[in-house]
Image (spheres, rainbow, N blue to C red):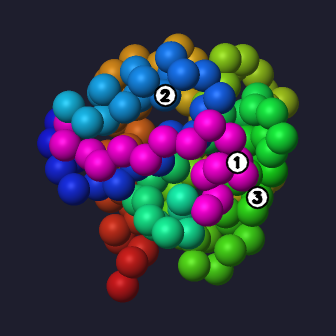
């Protein structure tokens, strides 16, 4: 899958998750931005305007729900797809993710295929809304 030129941000407090996502995405041609938590991410998002954002739900300081809500409240970023990452595959988490505006929910550990498929799907959808 060729995703050359797409900017993808991965927000996760787990170094392992960040590294594996970075390897999968970089090998597919993406430009990867990494952040350890929501505070760290928000400044980088404003500077770099990623095409797709992955955000872990369970993080210190600012959790994934709060981070997603802040991204979606910002008019310049609202169209950016936000995909929640969680090690729990719970209905409650999915519903809560949708309430704060997330576009998809991916269970960890994700596979290379599921990660890249999510990027391709949402980047294409975002391109369709950017006129």
Residue 23 lies in the magenta-colored region: no
Q: Are marks 1 and 3 in contact (CB under 8 Å)?
A: no
Q: Which of the two discs, 1 and 2, labels the residue nearer the N terminus?
A: 2
Rendered location of residue 100, percent (x, y): 77, 54
Element type where label 3 sits in the image: helix
Q: Where 16 falls versus 13 (above or below)? A: above
Task: Say which residue appears at 35% left-offset and 70% top-offset.
Answer: 128
Rendered location of residue 109, percent (x, y): 53, 14
Within-10-Å neighbours for mark 3: few <14, some 14–19, many 20+: some
Quadrant in the rendering for residue 104: top right
Instruction: Name the front one of labels 2 and 3.
Output: 2
Rendered location of residue 91, percent (x, y): 78, 27
Image side of residue 35 versus residue 102, left or right: left
Can the viewer see residue 32 in this picture? yes
Can the viewer see residue 98 in this picture? no
Q: Which residues are magenta?
A: 28-43
Q: Which mark is residue 18?
A: 2
Q: Which residue is mark 1?
A: 38
Q: Where 130 falls versus 121 (above or below)? A: below
Element type where label 1 sits in the image: helix
Task: Say which residue appears at 56% left-offset and 69% top-offset.
Answer: 46
Q: Which residue is mark 3?
A: 69
Q: Which of the two discs, 1 and 3, labels the residue nearer the N terminus?
A: 1
Q: Where 39 falls versus 118 (above or below)? A: below
Q: Quadrant of the C terminus?
A: bottom left
Real-space Cα separation, disc 1 to disc 3, in angstroms: 11 Å
Task: Say which residue appears at 65% left-offset and 29% top-offset.
Answer: 13
Real-space Cα separation, disc 1 to disc 2, in angstroms: 14 Å
Q: Where 22 falls versus 79 (above or below)? A: above
């Amino acid at each position: 899958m060729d995703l050359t030129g797409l900017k993808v941000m991965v927000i996760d407090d787990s170094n392992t998750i960040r590294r594996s996502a970075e390897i999968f995405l970089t090998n597919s041609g993406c430009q990867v931005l990494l952040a350890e938590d929501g505070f760290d991410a928000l400044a980088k998002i404003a500077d770099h305007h990623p095409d797709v954002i992955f955000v872990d739900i369970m993080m210190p300081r600012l959790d994934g729900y709060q981070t997603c809500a802040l991204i979606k409240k910002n008019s310049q970023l609202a169209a950016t797809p936000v995909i929640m990452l969680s090690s729990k595959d719970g209905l409650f988490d999915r519903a809560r993710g949708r309430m704060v505006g997330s576009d998809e929910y991916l269970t960890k550990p994700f596979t290379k295929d599921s990660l890249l498929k999510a990027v391709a799907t949402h980047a294409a959808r975002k391109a369709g809304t950017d006129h």
